[in-house]
Image: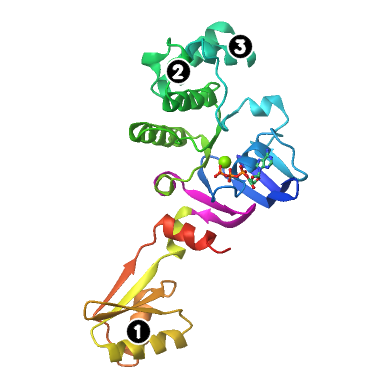
């Protein structure tokens, strides 16, 4: 089956700045895909390219097997990129109905779709209020409702929880979970890494227009995982550090209370490390796995690149 998003060799400059500098993306259908990167790394530009709002200088894009310039294909894609403009003197419901009309939906179906979408983002109680009085968070929810108006198979969201209060963040997060459970694909850019850890099965990290990581979130976290080998004798710790380094493991030593801790990458696994040390008569007081947060992996990937 076709991927939800497939892009090859995307390039787009603004003047001399390569905002997107040769990106390949493969987003399987049904996945929740996190798109991360520091400010200015090219996330929004990539999303605008994907949606056909901007033309790439080079590269190709397929959305749900079709072209982003094909109306029938775009009808199955819902997106929030930056703040969409709403008519301030129309109600939330009227605004969505207007978009439904523009999308050539019959009036009754458009009205029902507007009600459904407003329900999904918990705006039913203010559906008939003028958008003029809406807070930033309410407008953000309305933007998400607009993205969901046509019950899309693929939802692309550029920082959907930006500007929301903690309650709104939790709601949008659970909405994304529901979309995924109903078989939809969600492509999501965000700076909130806990959101990605909780929601996204896959993640790509962008840095200066290029991907510096791309894969399963679980694997990315495992890559950042470390083993901490504790010794109560500093002499043993020094010997152990030499053994581990000789085995090709980058070893960092720190002290904590009376213990010396050796921190090593976890690719060998704790039993292999135990064997390696026991072979030389070295017995750690403790050996524990230190899980990585996505934050630490993200910083490692994007700092100083
Ligand atoms: N319309 C534009 N005109 C000129 N330069 C632009 C334009 N849009 C983006 N850029 C530049 O392209 C680069 C990538 O910007 P982009 O908005 O895609 O980053 P981003 O990852 O979405 O950042 P943020 O996290 O701040 O939203 C930046 O250097 C930015 O200044
Ligand atoms: Mg952006």
Residue 222 magenta-highlighted: no
Mark positioned earlier in the residue sequence (1 or 2): 2
State the extent of the magenta-drawn residues as a range. Answer: 196-216
Q: Residue at x 48, y 83 (%)?
A: 248
Describe the element under mark 2 as helix, strand or loop: helix
**Disc number placed over residue 293 in the picture, else none:** none
Mark positioned earlier in the residue sequence (2 or 3): 3
Where is mark 3, residue-wise?
101
Picture quadrant of ligand 1? top right
Where is mark 1, residue-wise?
275
Rendered position, 105 above or below 194: above
Q: Does residue 55 appear left or right of residue 147 in this picture?
A: right
x and y percent of residue 159 in the render?
Answer: 50, 38
Q: Does residue 170 appear left or right of residue 144 in this picture?
A: left
Q: Quadrant of residue 97?
A: top right
x and y percent of residue 143 in the render?
Answer: 51, 25
Marks 2, 3: nearer the viewer: 3
Q: Residue at x 35, y 75 (%)?
A: 270
Q: Residues within 10 Å of mark 1 (few under 14, many from 20)?
A: few
Q: In this orientation, does residue 204 appear?
A: yes
Where is mark 2, residue-wise?
116
Q: In this orientation, does residue 2 appear?
A: no
Describe the element under mark 3 as helix, strand or loop: helix
């Amino acid at each position: 089956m076709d991927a939800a998003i497939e892009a090859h060799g995307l390039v787009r400059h603004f003047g001399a700045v390569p905002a997107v500098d040769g990106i390949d993306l493969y987003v399987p259908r049904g996945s929740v895909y996190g798109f991360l990167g520091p400010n200015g790394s090219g996330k929004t530009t990539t999303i605008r390219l994907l949606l056909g709002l901007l033309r790439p200088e080079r590269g190709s894009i397929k959305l749900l097997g079709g072209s982003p310039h094909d109306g029938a294909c775009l009808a199955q894609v819902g997106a929030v990129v930056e703040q969409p403009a709403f008519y301030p003197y129309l109600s939330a419901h009227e605004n969505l109905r207007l978009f439904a009309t523009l999308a050539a939906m019959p009036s009754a179906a458009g009205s029902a779709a507007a009600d459904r979408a407003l329900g999904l983002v918990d705006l039913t109680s203010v559906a008939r209020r003028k958008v003029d009085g809406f807070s930033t968070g309410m407008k953000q929810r309305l933007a998400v409702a607009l993205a969901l108006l046509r019950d899309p198979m693929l939802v692309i969201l550029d920082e959907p929880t930006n500007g929301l209060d903690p309650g709104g963040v939790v709601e949008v997060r659970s909405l994304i979970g529901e979309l995924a459970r109903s078989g939809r694909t969600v492509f999501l850019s965000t700076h909130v890494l806990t959101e990605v850890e909780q929601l996204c099965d896959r993640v790509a990290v962008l840095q200066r227009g290029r991907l510096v990581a791309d894969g399963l979130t679980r694997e990315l976290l495992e890559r950042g995982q470390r083993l901490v080998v504790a010794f109560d004798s500093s002499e043993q710790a020094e010997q152990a550090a030499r053994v581990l380094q000789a085995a090709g493991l980058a070893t960092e030593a720190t002290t904590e209370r009376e213990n010396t801790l050796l921190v090593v990458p976890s690719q060998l696994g704790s039993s292999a490390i135990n064997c390696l040390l026991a072979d030389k008569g070295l017995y750690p007081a403790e050996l524990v796995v230190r899980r990585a947060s996505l934050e630490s992996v993200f910083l490692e990937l994007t700092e100083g690149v």
